[in-house]
Image (cartoon, helix red, strand yellow):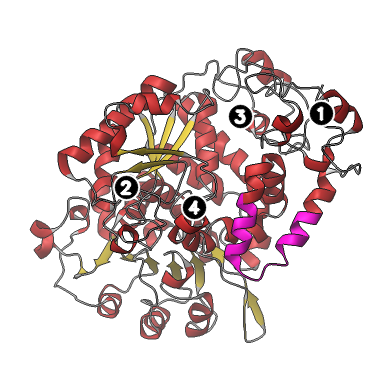
Amino acid sequence: MSSNPTQISDDYVSENRSGVGGGISDVYGEDLATLDQLVTPWVTSVASGYTLMRDPRYNKGLAFTDKERDAHYLTGLLPPVILSQDVQEKKMMHNLRQYTVPLHRYVALMDLQERNERLFYKLLIDNVEELLPVVYTPTVGEACQKYGSIFRRPQGLYISLKEKGKILEVLKNWPQRGIQVIVVTDGERILGLGDLGCQCLPITIDVGTNNEKLLNDEFYIGLKQKRATGEEYAEFLHEFMCAVKQNYGEKVLVQFEDFANHHAFELLSKYCSSHLVFNDDIQGTASVVLAGLIAAQKVLGKSLSDHTFLFLGAGEAGTGIAELIALKISKETGTPIDETRKKIWLVDSKGLIVSSRKESLQHFKQPWAHDHEPVKELLGAVNAIKPTVLIGTSGVGKTFTKEVVEAMATFNEKPLILALSNPTSQAECTAEEAYTWTEGRAIFASGSPFAPVEYEGKTFFPGQVLLLFTANNCYIFPGLGLGLIMSGAIRVRDDMLLAASEALASQVTEENFADGLIYPPFTNIRKISANIAASVGAKTYELGLASNLPRPKDLVKMAESCMYSPVYRNFR
C-alpha cells in the first residue's frame, strides 16, 4: 500500500477526471489534491476564527501553523505552542489510557470526533487493535444501551414517524450532498441486546420501541410509543427507500443494519432488484465467516465439501452464513445447491430443524429442514449429526457447554468452533474454554475479542471473526462497499460476496496459521480492504453490473487512491 493513500495514480486521474469515489463531483478539488497542495476550508463561506476551530472537518487544534493562524484570524485564540499531529495523537492516547472504564474511553473518543475528525480517524487507524474494542464490541453495546444518558451532539440523521410524508425534505437537511453509502437501522435487534430503539447508527428510522425500560426512561431520545408494524411500517420504509434514490441517485449503497429477522429478509428481498442494497447481518457476516472457513481448509488439508456444519441459531446470521457456504460448495463441486444445503444443519430455540417441522417454520428456515428425527437439545444434535464445524449465532451466552465441546473433540482431530455472538457476554463459549475442553486441538474464532490463551506451554491467538458482527463487519464491509462504489455497481449479487470471502482468505499467511489464526491481523485492515475492493470490483465488471467505464487497469491501486487520509491538510 502506498505511503500516501490520497495520492491518486495517473491512470486513475485520467480515467476519472470528472469525479472521485464512483463519480461524485469533487467541487473544491480536495479529493484529487495531493497532501502538499493547499486546500480551502469551505463551509458556506471560507471558515476562519472561531468558526474554523469549531468545525471538526477542518479543526487542527494546536497544529495550526503561525501562517495559518494569521491568515484565518486564529492569533490569540490558541496558546502559542504548535504541536504536530503525531504529538497530538501521542497525547490523546496517553489520556485515553488513563481511563479504567471502557465507556469513559468511548465517550472521550466521541468527544474527539466531534471536535477534530482527522485526529480521531488517525488515532483509530494507527491504534486499531487497541481502540476497536472501544468504539465497537464489546463497549459499543453498553454505549447503545446508555446512549440517552451520554448523548451530547447528534452525529447522524433521525427519521421518525412524525416525518412521514416528508422524508425527502429530511434527507435534504443533511449538509453533505455527495453521499455514496448509507447505513440505516430501525434499532430493533442491536447486537445480542435486542430492541434499543433510537440509540444507534448514522440513519435511524424511529418507528417506536417495544422496550419498556426505554419507554419509561426520562432520558430516552426517541419516540415514546410502541413500534409501528404491518402496512404502516412497510409504507414508511418504502418512502425512505424512494427518497434515498431520488435524493442521492441510483448508485447510492444502502446498508441495512440490525433489523429484526422478520423485517431484514423481507427488506433485502424487496429492494435487491431495484436498489443497491446490502444487509450486513445476513450477507456481511456470511462473507467473513466463509472467508475463515476457506482459510481453515489450508490447515486441515480439506475442502468445504468434506465438512458437515451445525449451527446454533437460525436467524439472519445463521441462515445467511449457511446459504453462502452452500453456494460456495455448489460452485466448487458443480452440485445443485439443494443438495449442498443437506450438509448444513441448524438448531433453533425448538431444537434441530427437521422436515417434520417444515410447515411451522419461518420461510427463511425452510430450506434447512432435512429428514431426521426431532432432536430437542444442542448436545443431542451434536451427537446425532457429528459435525466437523460448530457455529454459534444464537445471541445466547454459554450455550457451547463443556459436554458439547468435548463431544466435538471426540470425533474431530481439529474441530472448528466459531462462537460468533456479540457482545462478549453473549459468546457461546470463550477461547479458553474451547482450547481447554479440546486439549488445544480446536480451531477457534469468535465474534468478540478474547485474550491469547496459554495451554500446556503453547499460546493460542483466537481469531476474531466479526470485530463488527452487526454494523459492519469491518473485515468485509469497507472493502465490499469500496469495490461497489469505485466500479459504479448498480446491484449487489452473491458472487460479489464470494469474491470478498476469497480475497480475505487469500491474505492469511503461513505465519498467521502457525499462530492459530484464520484471519489476517487487523492492523493490516487498509491493505486487506484494498484487496477485497479490487476483487469485488473485478467481479462487478465481470458480471456486467459496473457503470464506471472503462475498467481501470489496476483495481488495487484505484482502491488505495480512493481511501481517506486523516493527515492534516495545509490551509491557504
Q: What amino acid is at disc 3?
A: Leu
Q: Which residue is mark 2?
A: 223
Q: What amino acid is at disc 4?
A: Ala
Residue at 65% across, 80% down: 458
Under tag 2, what secondary structure? loop
Report crowding for label 2: few under 14, some 14 to 19, many 20 or more residues within 10 A (C-alpha).
some
Q: Are marks 3 and 4 in contact (CB under 8 Å)?
A: no
x then y, percent, for residue 523:
68, 54
- Give the position of the N terminus as an image quadrant: top right
Q: Nearer the viewer, mark 2 or mark 4?
A: 2
Residue 299 to residue 487: above or below: below
- Tell me which label, 3 or 4, sits earlier in the chain: 4
Q: Nearer the viewer, mark 3 or mark 1?
A: 1
Residue at 51% across, 63% down: 301
Q: What amino acid is at disc 2?
A: Leu
Q: Quadrant of residue 528?
A: top right
Report crowding for label 4: few under 14, some 14 to 19, many 20 or more residues within 10 A (C-alpha).
many
Q: Which residue is mark 4?
A: 291
| Nearest to the observer: residue 253 or residue 211 | 211
Q: Magenta region: which residues?
A: 91-110
Answer yes or no: is residue 336 visible. Answer: no
Magenta run includes residue 458: no
Q: Are marks 1 and 4 in contact (CB under 8 Å)?
A: no
Q: Nearer the viewer, mark 1 or mark 4?
A: 1
x then y, percent, for residue 150:
52, 56
